[in-house]
Amino acid sequence: MNALYILWLRQIKVYSRQWTRIVGAVGQALFFLLALGFGLGPIYTEARKEDYLQFLVPGIIAMTILFLSVFSGMDVIWDRQFGFLKESLVAPVSRYQIMLGRTLGAATVAVIQGLIILGISYLLGFIVYNPALIPVATFFMFLTALLFTSMGTAVAAVLEDMQGFQLIISLIVIPVFFLSGAIFPLEGIPESLQIVAAVNPLSYGVDSLRGTLINQSFFGLQTDLAVLIILTAFFIYLGGVLFSRMQI
Amino acid sequence: MEYSHQIIRVMNLSKNFKGYPAVKKVSFTVDQGEIFAFLGPNGAGKTTVIKMLTTLLTPSSGLIFIGGFNIREEKNAIRRLFGIVFQDSSLDFDLTAYENMQFHAILYGMAKGEWKMKIEELLRLVGLWSRRHSLVKTFSGGMRRRLEVARSFLHQPKILFLDEPTLGLDPQTRKTIWQYLLDLNRNSGVTVFFTTHYLDEAAATAQRVAIIDGGEITALGTPLELQRKTQSGSLEEAYLKLVRKEAGEEGGLGADRLRQERKLWTKKL
């Protein structure tokens, strides 16, 4: 328990001291919000008679969480050679605990970042449908973050060095983001794309945030919750197994 | 127990990486309280052996007993027994010196009353107490290494593994680090197992020396025994006679490539 706590705390402390990372992630999200939100906004409003920014914000929060989570999961590649991770691997603590502590810490960081984006969006004019549901939205952010951190950890545990990193970004992170419905509605898109979105874990993360923040859900919150819980459990299990088999 | 004075026992230890034998049927023992040096060219298998002894790598075959525990069955019991200083720093650069120590203590399940005193004692010993609240990234290479030595000793291990503990340090810092290590060895009886390329260090500190080359132990004995056997005037001369002329191949799981990539990255950032 103590070990779990200290591994979690370590992630939080390091995050709070790396202000360049915070600013970078906020800047990236802001760029998407401004370029897409205000660039495509008028066309979207014309077609659907709805405000695009309202629609986009949950998607960008999910994007921020996706990027941060996958990257911090993949930090394992560096960490096992140069960082604190190696120090924890020789400590009398089980690998599963180490993986879980790290993942919980990284997910917490991603959620904080998600909430920062939510705050900034509010300043840009985003309206939360029912503020009482923000804790529920936060819970969904946390599930999504856990899912992708453990996915990143699983990938990192089988990669030997950074060679495969770029491949992972272009084959996983970018498609997962763009095909999740984060920036366009899933209603009325071609069926093939809809199928792709339906097997994309991030779609449910995005949808759950839309459901809780702007009361618009494609799959339904129950479905989102069920899918996210099952996938998160699966990836934590997979990440844990691969991580504990990892040789350095 | 008959072997109770032998804190490390290694029998026929082998490790293959994708068919390539990095360590071949290595056997040796280390006595409690001994200072034992592991010497050999780059890629000879030194780090691979240390990784196996410290539970980071699973041996392909062979037996390892540390403090009487079988490494295949009682990893956590063994992990409590040793402290390690890695070839690549494993400090957290975004934490302070004190936090690095504190996290280590908690990870090893030490009680607060116990670690508070021990951390102060060790940080004072390595001369970092006044800098305890500075982030490690502001430390020089020598300070970092001193902190790592202090941290490795925090949970009062019976064995210290040091993989090239003085690599890249200036002569003065090398001397200081060894002073701490010898003090710790003398005062607490900790067994020291280290690798180095500085043969003068091995000659000055080690009671026994093993030379590993091409994954095999080619010589083992006191520095004087090795000199006598090869009719050499110094350990360095003996060493050069005992290793093959051509340099070894680099093994390991892409560690060297990773080290290079990291250099590129950190330069860019």
Image (cartoon, coloured by chain):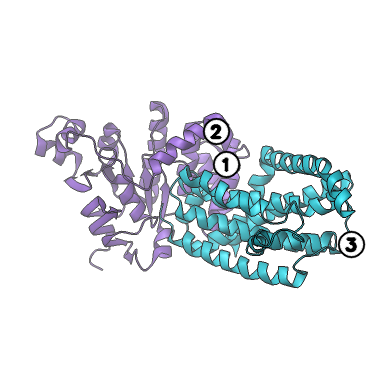
Chain colours: A cyan, B purple
Residue at (69% x, 39% y) in the render = A24
Q: Which mark is residue A181?
A: none
Mark positioned earlier in the residue sequence (1 or 2):
1
The residue under label 2 is B139
Q: Element type at marker 1?
A: helix
Q: Residues within 10 Å of mark 1 (few under 14, many from 20)?
A: many
The amino acid sitting under disc 2 is Phe
Q: Are marks 2 and 3 in contact (CB under 8 Å)?
A: no
Q: Position of residue A41 (x, y in %)?
A: 84, 45
Q: Element type at marker 2?
A: loop
In this rendering, the label closer to the viewer, 1 or 3: 3
Mark 2 belongs to which subunit?
Answer: B
Residue B110 in view of the camera: no
Q: Is residue B227 left or right of residue A11?
A: left
The residue under label 1 is B97
Front residue of A144/B91: it is: A144
In this rendering, the label closer to the viewer, 2 or 3: 3
Q: Position of residue B182 (x, y in %)?
A: 36, 41
Could you say which quadrant of the image residue B247 lies in? Answer: top left
The residue under label 3 is A130
Front residue of A70/A190: it is: A190
Q: Are marks 1 and 2 in contact (CB under 8 Å)?
A: yes
